[in-house]
Amino acid sequence: MKENSSLPSHRNGGFTSSVGFIIACVGSAVGLGNIWMFPYRVGQYGGAAFLIPYLLFTLLFGWVGLSAEFGIGRLARTGTLGAYGYCFERRGRRRLGTALGWIPLLGSLGIAIGYAIILGWVLRSLAGSVTGRLLASDPSVYFSGATGAFGSLPWHAAIVAVVCLVLALGVTKGIEKASKVLMPLFFALFLFLAVWVAFLPGAAEGYRFLFVPRWQALLRLDTWVMAMGQAFFSLSITGSGMIVYGAYLDKSADIPAASLRTALFDTMAALLAGLAIMPAVFAFGVDVTRGPSLMFITLPTVFQKMPFGRFFAVFFFLSVAFAGITSLINMFEAVIESWQTRFCLPRGAAVALCGGVTFTVGVFLEAEPVVGAWLDFITIVVVPIGAVLGAVAVYYVLGWPRIRQELETGRARPLSRAFGRAAKYLYVPLTALILILGFVYGGIG
């Protein structure tokens, strides 16, 4: 994509450069799952052996999955609802397409509601790290103080307000500028933490946990299932969020190349999180756990034991906040753009409405078991259904010949025949399989 080339004809504006677009997409993809789930799964399912199926699925999903969402967004010049309507209009069923588009859109809103609550916990932990309260108390007690009913209202509200403020500035001045600041800082901070923990006595055990291959794990079905789920959900292929970023993309952009770069940087972020977290956990002999307890209880326990732990804690929670906010920006934008387009709302009104709905619903979900159940339902049911609909809508309803034309726009060379085959006969069936396996396993992302 050429710098400052002709911008998309979307009323919200567009990305001014390929760098801005890719950084914003990486910001959407890099989230809490990279930080609290990926390191644990690598170690649990075979160490370096797990990386083989993970990288294979990441390559496939990034290559044809992200490309589909970016491509239909740019082709339709609009987000979720309009893009689905565009696909089905070719079959004379535009209303059906628009109606189906509400499913992935509600998936984005549903994740945003739960995500904002968890980021409120992150912000509270950051404040506790700055003041020293987090490290001066029992981390489990400090964490429980935020996770009861109505337990995190001011922090929850602050997260929603920050995201709304960024989005009120628009695509170029809001999303792109915020991503260009927050994502480089995320990588820089986590790189610093990874180097720091490398010198801790006992850190080598963490590296063994992550990278010593246990090849027998490749013979286990669970390893492949969890690698597929981790790759799929990590890339934010929801049938919604990445479509809206595609709508703001210039016609000179090479979409498949941008998709692969997004997948590459997302993988780098996950590996960097593992290098920063697991050596520290093992250096201090703390049990390896998964889920929120790793971030909010286990790691603060480690920080209490290490030299300059307070400084380390501030860096860690600041990095997590940056990653989470850039992801939340994308979830909000998917909803905001569709509401602007569908209901002819001014951008400010759509931003305020999205923020208000997110916070109002979230207030009643703040208790940890409640928000956990909410996110389980959204990620096991709603989001996978939306992803299946998106894959089918692009590669079958709209059709491979038409989306191929769009994906080859901006490229120096045509796409290979393997791309279309991988999209139609591997990617689309795998999205359906992810939906089924989510029910079987009780969640794989």
Image (cartoon, helix red, strand yellow):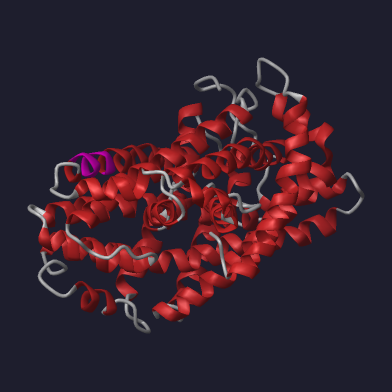
Locate residue 294: give its quadrant. bottom left
Give the residue displayed 36% in from the left and 67% down from the top.
292
Give the residue displayed 57% in from the left and 34% down from the top.
259
Q: Residue furthest front?
A: 216
Residue 189 pos. (x, y %): 25, 42
Q: Residue furthest bottom?
A: 149
Locate residue 72: give its quadrant. top right
- Find out whether residue 194 is within the magenta segment: yes
- In the depicted structure, whether residue 60 falls above or below residue 406: below
- Find out whether residue 36 is within the magenta segment: no
One can see residue 424 in this view: yes
Give the residue displayed 78% in from the left and 49% down from the top.
393
Look at the image and give the residue range highlighted in magenta. Answer: 190-195
One can see residue 342 in this view: no
- Helix, strand or loop: magenta stretch: helix
> In the image shown, does 385 or 327 lie closer to the viewer?
385
Locate residue 58: give its quadrant. top right
- In the depicted structure, whether residue 311 falls above or below residue 192: below
Q: Is residue 389 left or right of residue 213?
A: right
> In the image shown, does 116 or 57 lie closer to the viewer?
57
